[in-house]
Image (cartoon, helix red, strand yellow):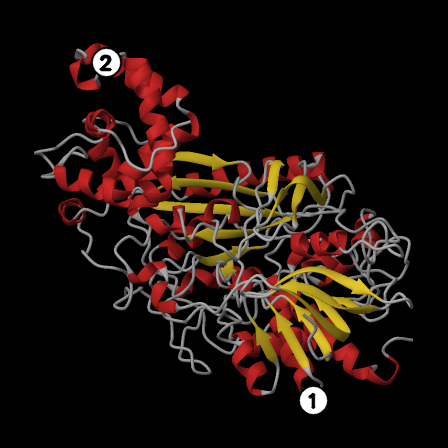
């Protein structure tokens, strides 16, 4: 297992490549891919306790690819990615999770989703009261709480 | 180092430790509580930052093995399909819980009598009724009185709004003719006793920055401390010592600087939960108690009950509350009571989930294989995100001695104290119950129009409820404590947490744990003159 505290240049390059395969750029939704420099910078800056597992996942990916992921043809790259997801275990899951958790807090992505660019606190959210008459059939049906004796 | 003796020493400042401390404070005895963690700082809670969801996978994970804060101890739960989750610090796991607040039912205390399985409790629901009420006032409960299939409660605050998700569930349940009701929760829906009302931060489980969710650091503890109870933080108890008479003489603990201390006490109360309590008792070995303290029955650590959670979730076309509301809002007791035609004994409660935030949705959906990589990712994510509804069945686990907490021969915490090891399997009865719940959950979601239905069977990091490992009873050969929480073996040793549960019911247990703690405190106060007889 990799015990590095930061990723090598080769690992960072493969991280960019696999991130783009997970979430590519979309002109339709006007969002960057997960290989976007700002998303990648966020990932690297916040890896923290996940660094070792992500490095382990990237080592596994490098073994499967045999060379930098970006240098593979598309069909081979897809096959390697599929194998990586299937065989990468907890390390691969961690890598994917850190990509997703940084991508889905990027301002451009949140805007595209119609979400506000802020922490939940202190503004919070407004919750509609909902239709309480839906409870009427339950009240009408009633029921009996089971007692403590036979 | 030896400290001045105290009258009462409480180990653990969580749900039950706080309640018992507050109740005993009016005796004017010198009461000291030791907790291995510290006071929480709400300004640091996840919902105060843009990275609020990411923190759930690290510093604010529910799993102590992932979280690994200095106050956490490791748990070897490799041999269990359900992993232990908890929180260590002032407030304990009430800092990190969903605040869902059902009570055990009257029938839950008479399982042997009614259904011929497990054992009856040595007390009944009626004995706890005034303490349920008192606890609801202290914790601050919101809800709607009058549920025909739940014990009568009188929540001092109105229920949470149904929001967007509640009506979707309610309509589906009505079509099926199944019971549902707004949940009692400890989320304040109005300003209450110095707590601000809920503003729907959404990310309630890993602590509430608003202070709307009740945790004992902001409910019981301020009252207890004002009444004279002393609370020392970052003090981890290693073992309970006994004297020549076989009475507890005090505890050995490591203080915040790691210095070993001895704290003498006339009475010791353990409030460390269903894993921490047996761990402490099993670590308290002496010549007189070679198999651990209070363990003449051999049952310390045995009969661990978790509540296996069977969860089904899916995605509807309508928007749901997502991360814009407390996570739970409704419960159902439709399948709570025994119906042998279902193929199992006892039953389960259901709690409905309002939805999830975008990061959680992306991570969990990718793991389930319903959120693809590549060009279609964006379209599918927009279909899923903000459209989730969840049905979680809290299945009643019956006590089985092979489900147990022991001491791990290798694993130790940061002070070198042996860590707990969990050996647990889901029983055949629980398995059938979970299958039934998964089928019913799928049914209600399909009626609600949900697609892409997924299951968590069980929820793997779902070991919130740690019960049964120091059970109460009148027979010293079949129980660890008596009907008012006192050890059969050690007359000045009491246990007040979930480990004393005889059976688990099919509901979240914290309300009942705290009612029990208040009941035991009341029993102690009534018997002060002859507490050790």
- What secondary structure is marked by label 2? loop
Q: Determine if marks 1 and 2 fall on one subunit.
A: no
Residue at 44% x, 48% y is B172
Residue B352's tag is none
B195 left or right of B164? Answer: right
Identify the subunit bearing mark 1.
B
Residue B176 visible:
no
Assign the N terminus of chain B to one quadrant of the image.
Answer: bottom right
Name, please, the residue furthest toward the front.
Answer: B1
**Label 2: which residue?**
A67
Residue A36 position in % (x across, y down): 14, 36
**Label 1: which residue?**
B28
Camera-side residue: B519 or B414?
B414
Q: Is residue B65 above or below residue B9?
A: above
Residue B264 position in % (x across, y down): 74, 73
Residue A144 position in % (x across, y down): 67, 61
Crowding at dot 2, Cα within 10 Å, few <14 / some 14-19 / many 20+, comes out as few
Q: Is residue B35 above or below residue B31?
A: above
B214 left or right of B263? Answer: left
């Amino acid at each position: 297992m990799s015990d590095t505290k930061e990723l090598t240049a080769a690992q960072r390059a493969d991280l960019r490549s696999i991130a783009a395969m997970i979430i590519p750029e979309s002109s339709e939704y006007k969002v960057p891919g997960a290989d976007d420099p700002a998303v990648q910078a966020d990932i690297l800056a916040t890896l923290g306790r996940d660094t070792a597992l992500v490095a382990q996942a990237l080592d596994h990916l490098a073994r499967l690819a045999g060379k930098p992921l970006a240098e593979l043809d598309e069909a081979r790259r897809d096959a390697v990615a599929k194998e990586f997801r299937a065989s990468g275990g907890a390390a691969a899951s961690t890598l994917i999770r850190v990509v997703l958790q940084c991508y889905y807090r990027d301002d451009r992505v949140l805007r595209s989703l119609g979400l506000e660019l802020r922490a939940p606190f202190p503004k919070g959210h407004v919750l509609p009261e909902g239709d309480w008459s839906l409870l009427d059939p339950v009240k009408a049906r009633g029921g009996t709480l089971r007692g403590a004796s036979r | 180092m030896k400290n001045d003796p105290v009258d009462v020493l409480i180990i653990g400042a969580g749900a039950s430790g706080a309640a018992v401390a507050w109740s005993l404070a009016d005796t004017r005895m010198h009461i000291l509580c030791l907790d291995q963690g510290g006071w929480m700082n709400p300004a640091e809670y996840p919902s105060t930052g843009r990275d609020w969801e990411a923190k759930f996978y690290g510093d604010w994970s529910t799993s102590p093995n992932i979280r690994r804060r200095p106050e956490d101890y490791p748990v070897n739960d490799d041999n269990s399909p359900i992993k232990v989750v908890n929180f260590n610090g002032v407030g304990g796991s009430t800092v990190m819980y969903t605040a869902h607040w059902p009570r055990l039912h009257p029938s839950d205390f008479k399982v042997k009598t009614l259904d011929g399985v497990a054992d009856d409790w040595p007390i009944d629901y009626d004995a706890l009724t005034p303490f349920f009420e008192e606890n609801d006032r202290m914790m601050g409960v919101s809800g709607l009185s009058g549920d025909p299939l739940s014990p009568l409660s009188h929540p001092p605050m109105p229920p949470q709004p149904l929001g967007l998700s509640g009506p979707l569930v309610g309509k589906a349940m009505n079509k099926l003719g199944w019971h549902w009701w707004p949940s009692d929760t400890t989320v304040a829906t109005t300003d209450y006793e110095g707590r601000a009302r809920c503003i729907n931060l959404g990310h309630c489980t890993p602590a509430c920055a608003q202070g709307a969710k009740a945790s004992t650091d902001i409910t019981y503890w301020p009252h207890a401390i004002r009444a004279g109870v002393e609370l020392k933080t970052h003090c981890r108890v290693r073992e309970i010592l006994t004297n020549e008479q076989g009475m507890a003489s005090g505890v050995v603990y490591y203080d915040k600087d790691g210095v070993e201390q001895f704290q003498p006490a006339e009475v010791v109360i353990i409030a460390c939960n269903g894993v921490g309590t047996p761990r402490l008792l099993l670590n308290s070995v002496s010549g007189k108690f070679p198999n651990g303290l209070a363990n003449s029955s051999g049952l310390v650590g045995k009969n661990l009950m978790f509540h296996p959670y069977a969860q089904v979730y899916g995605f509807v076309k309508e928007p749901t509350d997502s991360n814009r509301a407390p996570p739970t809002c409704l419960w159902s007791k439709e399948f709570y009571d025994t119906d042998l035609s279902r193929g199992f004994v006892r039953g389960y409660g259901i709690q409905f989930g309002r939805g999830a935030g975008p990061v959680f949705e992306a991570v969990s959906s990718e793991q389930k294989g319903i959120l693809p990589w590549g060009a279609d990712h964006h379209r599918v994510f927009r279909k899923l995100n903000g459209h989730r509804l969840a049905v979680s069945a809290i299945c009643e686990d019956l006590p089985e001695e092979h489900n147990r907490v022991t001491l791990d021969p290798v694993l130790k915490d940061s002070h070198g104290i042996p860590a707990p090891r969990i050996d647990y399997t889901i029983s055949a009865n629980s398995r059938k119950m979970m299958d039934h719940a998964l089928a019913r959950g799928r049914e209600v979601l399909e009626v609600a129009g949900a697609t892409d239905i997924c299951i968590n069977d069980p929820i793997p990091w779902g070991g919130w409820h740690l019960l049964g490992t120091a059970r109460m009873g009148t027979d010293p050969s079949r129980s660890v404590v008596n009907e008012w929480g006192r050890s059969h073996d050690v007359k000045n040793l009491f246990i007040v947490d979930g480990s004393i549960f005889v059976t688990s019911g099919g509901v979240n247990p914290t309300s009942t744990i705290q009612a029990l703690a208040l009941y035991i405190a009341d029993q102690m106060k009534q018997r002060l003159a002859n507490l050790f007889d």
